[in-house]
Image (spheres, grey):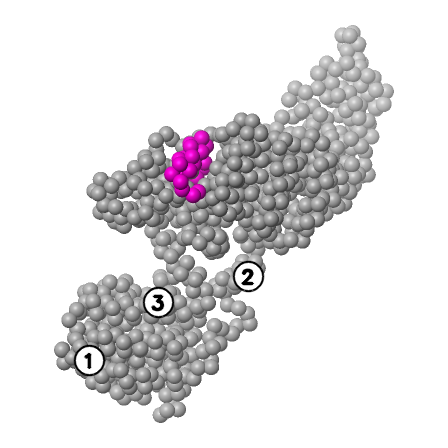
Amino acid sequence: MYRLLFRTVYTARRSSVSVCEWTVFPKAEDDGKVDNMATRVEEPVVLQRDDGGTIKQQMDVKIEQIIAKPKKVKTDGVKSGKESLLDLLGTMKVDVTNKRKLTNLKPQQNYYTTPKSEQAEVATVEASSKKSETLDPELVSAASAAASTLPNRSQAESALLMKLRQHEAIAEAQKKGNMNNLGEIIADMKVTKLNRRQNTGTYNQIQFDEDGRGYKQGVHLLITLVSYSSARPTLWDMDYANWLSNSINLMPRNGLEEMIQWTKEGKMWQYPINNEIGLEEEASVPFHEHIFLDKHLKEGFPSQGPVRHFMELVVAGLSRNPYLTVQQKREHISWFRDYFQQKEDVLKEADAC
Amino acid sequence: MPETVSLVLEEVSEEALKERITLRKVKASVDMYDQLLQAGTAVSIETTHNLLDLICLYCDREPVEGGGPQTEDTEPGEGAKKRKIRFQQSLVSPKCTWEENNNAERLFNVLPERDTRCYSALIRGMAKHGAYEKAFSMYTGLLNERLKADIHIFNALIISAPNVREKYTERWELINELLTHMKEQEVRPNLLTFNNVLQALKRCGTVAKSKSLQTLYEMKALGIAPSLTTYSYILEIFSRTAGVVQTTSNMLPEIMSELSGKSFTCQGPNDGAFFINTMKMCLESIDLEQGYKIQSLLECGENWRLLGASFHQGIYYGTFFRLLCEREHIDVVLKWYKKLIPTHFYPNSQGLGKLLQALDAGNRLDLLPQIWQDIRTLHHEDKSHLVEELLSLMTRDKHSPEVQESFAACALDVKGVFEIVAHGPPLEWSPSSLKNITSLLLRANKTQQAWEVLQLFKSKNRIPPNQLLDDFLSACHSSGSAERALDLVRLSAAFDLPATAELAKRTLAEFQLTEEQRAILSDLVSVTEFSD
């Protein structure tokens, strides 16, 4: 049993890693194949586990992996989550247990047609939450259940959800494999957010070249300029940086230089291909520290009740999350520990402990 | 196509104001600010600063679609022009686009308390858009309020100093005063300050040389490394104020040896101008060695990027190529020609003309047909002076038969070009070009085509020269076509040329003619003789 678990879980981790890589690589075409691989790997896990309640969670894993493709979904827009799900279904072997899977899948399908409709669905589940598109609605509903014991329901809910969302954001960043360039990511996020609202090519803080190549360098220039002065970049600085980036020629002269530039930016893989690039330190962390997080629930949390249930779900989700480090997972759990301990008196009032 | 962005927040609040500022909607943000003031809500000082920055940067006008104070065009042609203007530093032009009592000033006067950043925004905007006197008066106001100016204020004032004083000495005194103030207020100068000082010194006449050297010493004392722009300004100062070119040639080698092998990052928008200016200087003094040094510096590391867009690359490489054509051996010239064109730049017609001269000097006229092909590829075939020169070079001497053949083929091609009406009116046939083409064809024994070109003389109302007709007659003689000879004489008679008689006599003498032909010819002879 353990060996099987080991193998399946290990391969689950590997498959999720490869999903991660598939999102980074710009020209992934065999998305469907990845899904199939993921499903085939997941199936033994599903078949072996006979705990009925956890089948749903297995679905969540798959679906989380489908969430792992929202980048892809957003970028090419050709494959919606529904289509990929249908691919998944197509490759599933016809089996008795599959019927259960299918019946369990279908109600979940509603949540995952597209990220947008997902948002709509979640909105109906949680009227107060605004942007939980990347959060598992299971988790969201569990959070609402836990928070419902507290008097200020919406506030607690939003606090819990915010925490989950934050970690989701960091996980996304780590998924992109750019943890080292967090500063750049933040700069990226800021700038791209503004982009959505501005005219492209006119008021952009840093001007787009024909296909946006000068963009990143412009950001670099801005960052160096800012390091000149201690204050935040003013409009004058941005204008100057814009002028500078226009007066020099940042374009690559040929395809080879372009590829070099992309490799430096992280848009292209480094050759020879190393599957575990960016994961060197993780290689030394044993898998059981990622998976078996129950031990953190031993002290600090009540052993029964909705809070415990919520925390078990949190732990279950964390155990399947390949993008966070062990330290981050522990911090996650300890945050919840502190949170619930702060609210202990309120919980006692509501007899939830 | 840019999509229009609509504002999200509509209510009167500081958030809405911030949104408008980020979207750079000048008028909307000014309106929102006025509304806020009327409503009595206090606006945070940070937002006020940003608002003033916005208004001053765009001079109270909306940023233009694809334009703006200094933004990029999507079309490379227009962008090149705009960049050209920018290269000449719009700050130097005295044209003032700053309106009287515009929103910036109005808001500024309304502000309850004004700190350095507000002044800074105003002064920078005024200096940028040409209101130099106002900038200085604003600075006096700042001093009166016992505020400290920041580095940007000083930079802006230094660059606008030559615009507010007429005499050279006064200009320098003003700059000196500003620098003293800077020291008193303990504002640390940066690279831009010194570059602005040098740029202003360019317009300060004779004092410039010594002061620029002093500036360099100051920079060294402060530990600020000079950038390419600094060197460029210094070279300009020394080359311009000195009537003799000698002084430049002392400076340039030193500077080049200092800079050799270093790779630079862009520290100012005019860094690329260094290469262009130095290459121009080399061309003026025809200094080939320095030219090579500059080129090697350009190729070092990533320096070539500093040249910027294709427009500036064109200027630089064009100058370099002209320098090469002047002095260098033709083989080296051809080597560079193959290297630079068309990968680095497209030469203009003057450059190609220079190349033709170099080919002539280097006695490689056999390459002329190839160069003609290049001329056609570069679409310079409509430049008449180029075509004329090409034809005259080809016709001038007699060459070996193969070369003549190729010349004749080229001549036919040129003839074809004359008839194209592709872009605008076709080239004008000049007598020399007609003559050249005809003689080229004759030399290659393409008599029929030569005859056709000769007909063109009539249709374009040009007179064929005597020599040409003589040559033609000899050609007819060698090919043995008496009929053609007769036609030739008739043609010259139609033009009423004095040489007709000679031609007729020659024909009578040299050719085997029928009686009829003899009769016609004798008539022509008598006609022309009697008409004298």
Task: Give the secondary structure at mark 3.
Answer: helix
Amino acid type indicated by mark 3:
Ala
* CB atoms of marks 3 and 1 within 8 Å: no
**How many C-alpha atoms fall within 10 Å of the one at disc 2: few (<14), some, or many (≥20)?**
some
Amino acid type indicated by mark 1:
Pro
Residue on which the image places disc 2: A260
State the CA–CA distance, disc 3 to disc 2. Answer: 29 Å
At horizontal 39% and vertical 55% (from top left) the residue drawn is A191
Q: Is residue B46 visible?
A: yes
Amino acid type indicated by mark 2:
Ile
Residue on which the image places disc 3: A169
Residue on which the image places disc 1: A306
Name of the residue lying farthest toward the right? B509
Q: Give the magenta-colored segment's residue range.
A: B124-149
Task: Give the secondary structure at mark 1.
Answer: helix
Task: Give the secondary structure at mark 2.
Answer: helix
Task: Answer yes or no: are tags 3 and 2 on the same subunit.
Answer: yes
Find residue A82 and report its horizontal and vertical position in percent. 30, 68
At horizontal 77% and vertical 23% (from top left) the residue drawn is B469
Does the magenta portion include A316? no
At horizontal 47% and vertical 29% (from top left) the residue drawn is B95
Does the magenta portion include B144? yes
User: Up-down: is B14 above or below B497?
Assistant: below
At horizontal 59% and vertical 45% (from top left) the residue drawn is B218
- Most common secondary structure along the magenta stretch: helix
Dividing the picture into quadrants, the one containing residue B366 is top right
Q: Quadrant of the C terminus of chain A?
A: bottom left
